[in-house]
Image (cartoon, coloured by chain):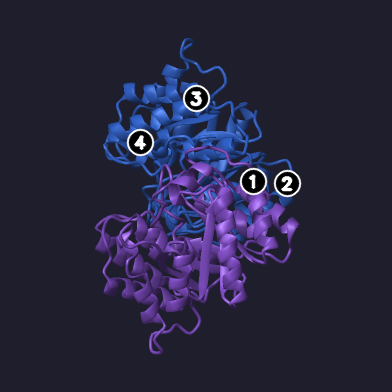
Chain colours: A blue, B purple
């Protein structure tokens, strides 16, 4: 694995926010572009009730398709977001490589998102994670609204560390802090990840930033400085949690990779293919996406 | 002066890119909002040929207005961009507080912008700066395209340091690196400013980033880490040099100030007033501006 790992969440965090339903064939085309570009991890979808979120209705089928011998990516891992036990069972059945689970540190956001308190949500997530880990599955657990909440404002950092502590105690070694509401700033990012690495040096940290106030890419840079390895971004800068107060796009994967390549990192990724993908998404969705690089093209070196 | 100084260049770098000519009264209204918000330095306009750039035709009148006793800001400095001797004389006559001069490190950009080579432009700038300094004026000299050029691609860092060396030798103590083409990345920003502080610890550095590839605010954060004090940003994220290959907006002043305030810096600035200004500019120009915060509103704390 590379020192910086790209986890594209556009197929899930991006498409869940769109009113348009992207057909199965188009999703396959886009996931193939992500695989061919050399994306390390692709979040294919979430295991939610298709009645409630029809954008994610073909998640199981997509995993089925990409687990067929001829379609299986050689290097890329396929991740899926799981909200409950039923989702986990569906994920096991269709061959998820990496199970992503999470709880919101904001009580308001947690209730709106899952109908559960943060405490109950944490307990549930840890139960599923333990089951998955003991079955030999890869697991990532996240803390959503870790840097603040559109409804509640500031979220106690101690509360976030408390959840992380429980994750670590449960044996979860891959932990993500998600800035659902875009409230993170670079100083806070360095402080919070720094504190977690003090708790456990061996934990592998992931980050997930939204661009509500324009700080997403600065937060990614701060996270790099703090030693974070996994970066969850979305092609074109799509995305936003439908249950947050002011949903706003993710950091664009191609903007982040473009920055990395300008720092002489991850030159193995085919950025041109990522740009083709975002242009295709722009065309299909019929609107300009928030990303910069797919519009400006790559910088002349 | 504060540790971070906000120099809003929207009235110059922003409006020079707009096809609409903003009337004198509207400019006065906007500059007043910047003054009331507590902006440290406001770039009122440039002293160029009004035939060539009618957007800047009332620069002298604006300085005249704000130098009248009843309109003179108590704390805010008013800067003006000067391209040649004639511009400097106009600036002296109408009472510029801070003279901004510059040369492009890219030969192609320099020729397109001023019809001069980088070497000739540097010599000219230094002559004017020396005259201004010996007359007791405040002077800032910049290196444009300091991080790369849309036409030429990479620009030799040694070439940039060479220009800075000449500035320092001429007694210029306030020096700006401008990323005209948006090619900077945070690592490069830290490296280049770090190198200049090694040359002279007492120099006061300024930075000016464009958002072509979405790295502007990350570059500002990197510049803060490197010890840069002056930040040139534009309300609403307006701007772009008309003689660069791919003009693109500046970092938005209110986005930058919002980030600072979330780091508990510059709480003295009235961000609400800045948002009023960007909304007014959006309405007057009849288009969505690139800034995030004026659209999203301030984060709930």
Q: Is residue B251 left or right of residue B129?
A: left
Query: Dot 1: what SS?
Result: helix
Question: Which residue lies most toward the top here?
Answer: A70
Q: Nearer the viewer, residue A89 or A190?
A: A190
Q: Residue at x 47, y 76 (%)?
A: B92
Q: Is residue A84 visible?
A: no
Q: Are the residues at dot 3 and dot 4 in contact (C-beta closer than 8 Å)? A: no
Give the secondary structure at mark 2.
loop
**On the picture, is A40 further left or further right than B9?**
right
Among numbered discs 3 and 4, the one appearing first in the sequence: 3
Compared to A254, does A290 lie above or below? below
Cα separation, mark 3 vs mark 4, equals: 31 Å
The residue beneath circle 1 is B159
**Chain where mark 1 sits:** B
Quarter of the image with the N terminus of chain A is top right
User: Which is more foreground, mark 2 or mark 3?
Assistant: 3
Q: Which mark is residue A49?
A: 4
Name the mark on residue A37: 3
Image quarter hosting the C terminus of chain A: top right
Question: Residue beneath label 2, please?
Answer: A200
Residues marked 4 and 1, same chain: no
* Mark 2 neighbour class, 10 Å CA radius: few under 14, some 14 to 19, many 20 or more: few
CA distance for labels 4 and 1: 60 Å
Whole-percent x and y of residue B228?
Answer: 63, 61
Dot 4 crowding, Cα within 10 Å, few <14, some 14–19, many 20+: few
Q: Nearer the viewer, mark 4 or mark 2?
A: 2
Q: Chain of mark 3?
A: A
Query: Where is residue B223 shown, x and y percent of the image?
Result: 61, 56
Left or right: A56 in relation to A269: left
Q: Residue at x 53, y 58 (%)?
A: B102
* Dot 4: element: loop
């Amino acid at each position: 694995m590379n020192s910086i790992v790209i986890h594209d969440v556009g197929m899930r965090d991006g498409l869940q926010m769109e009113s348009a339903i992207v057909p199965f064939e188009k999703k396959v085309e886009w996931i193939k572009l992500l695989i061919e570009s050399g994306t390390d991890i692709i979040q294919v979808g979430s295991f939610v009730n298709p009645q409630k979120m029809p954008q994610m209705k073909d998640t199981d089928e997509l995993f089925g398709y990409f687990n067929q011998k001829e379609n299986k990516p050689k290097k890329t891992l396929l991740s899926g977001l799981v909200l409950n036990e039923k989702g986990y069972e569906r994920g096991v059945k269709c061959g998820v490589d990496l199970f992503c689970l999470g709880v919101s540190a904001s009580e308001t956001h947690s209730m709106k998102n899952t109908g559960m308190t943060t405490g109950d949500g944490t307990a549930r997530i840890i139960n599923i994670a333990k089951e998955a880990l003991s079955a030999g599955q890869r697991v990532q657990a996240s803390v959503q609204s870790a840097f603040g909440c559109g409804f509640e404002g500031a979220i106690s950092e101690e509360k976030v560390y408390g959840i992380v502590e429980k994750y670590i105690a449960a044996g979860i070694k891959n932990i993500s802090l998600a800035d659902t509401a875009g409230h993170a700033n670079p100083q806070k990012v360095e402080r919070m990840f720094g504190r977690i690495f003090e708790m456990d040096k061996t934990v592998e940290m992931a980050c997930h930033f939204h661009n509500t106030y324009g700080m997403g890419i600065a937060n990614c840079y701060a996270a790099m400085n703090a030693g974070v390895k996994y970066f969850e971004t979305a092609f074109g800068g799509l995305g936003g949690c439908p249950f947050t107060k002011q949903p706003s796009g993710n950091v664009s994967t191609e903007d982040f990779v473009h920055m990395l390549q300008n720092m002489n990192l991850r030159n193995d990724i085919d950025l041109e293919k990522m740009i083709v993908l975002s242009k295709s998404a722009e065309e299909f969705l019929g609107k300009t996406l928030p990303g910069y690089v797919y519009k400006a093209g790559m910088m002349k070196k």
